[in-house]
Image (cartoon, rainbow, N blue to C red):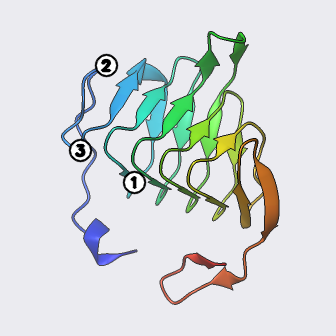
Amino acid sequence: MADRFKAWKYPCIEDGKPTEYGWVVKNVKGLDLGFGTDIGAFTYINALNGVIIEENVQIGSHCSIYSISTIDDKQGQVMLKSGCRIGSHSIIMPGVTVGRNALVGAFSLVNKDVPDGYLALGIPLKIVKPLAGPDSTGKEKL
């Protein structure tokens, strides 16, 4: 675990109000937040149908995570598995799972599952390649 997470504490999350870190959760009862999670400012999470964020997940700033989409009536639980990383300005759609230690590139539209340990990016999402394995910090290398 990175040194910056040794003193990590669960943030105070109130429905529809920014946390001390500047991200917002709507339907907070549907959020399951794992230990050591890093969520960037201006990220929005709608957890009406469940959003599970496992431990040591990194989510960049300005991301949107939706368990419901009123535009096309899609809904479903979102799961971000342990150690995955989501690039800034990405959108995670309902029913999607991002696998353990997977990496989603910035500005991606995640409209399908990402396998464990894979790089995925783009609009719409393309599964690009498996990552090379962990570096000295435990993060997957490109």
Looking at the rendered structure, the secondary structure element under dot 2 is loop
Q: Position of residue 1 (x, y in %)?
A: 40, 74
Above or below — where is 106 with respect to 66?
below
The residue that disc 2 covers is 15
The residue that disc 1 covers is 35
Nearer-N-terminus badge (1/2): 2
**Amino acid under label 3?**
Tyr
**Amino acid under label 2?**
Asp
Q: Is residue 9 left or right of residue 141?
A: left
The residue lying toward the viewer, choosing from 47 and 66, is 66
The residue that disc 3 covers is 21
Q: Position of residue 50 (x, y in %)?
A: 57, 26
Q: What residue sits 71% from the left and 64% below the top? A: 119
Nearer-N-terminus badge (3/2): 2
Q: CA distance from mark 1 to mark 3?
A: 15 Å
Q: What residue sits 74% from the left and 61% below the top? A: 116
The label on residue 83 is none
Between disc 1 and disc 2, the foreground one is 2
Q: CA distance from mark 3 to mark 2?
A: 14 Å
**Amino acid under label 1?**
Phe
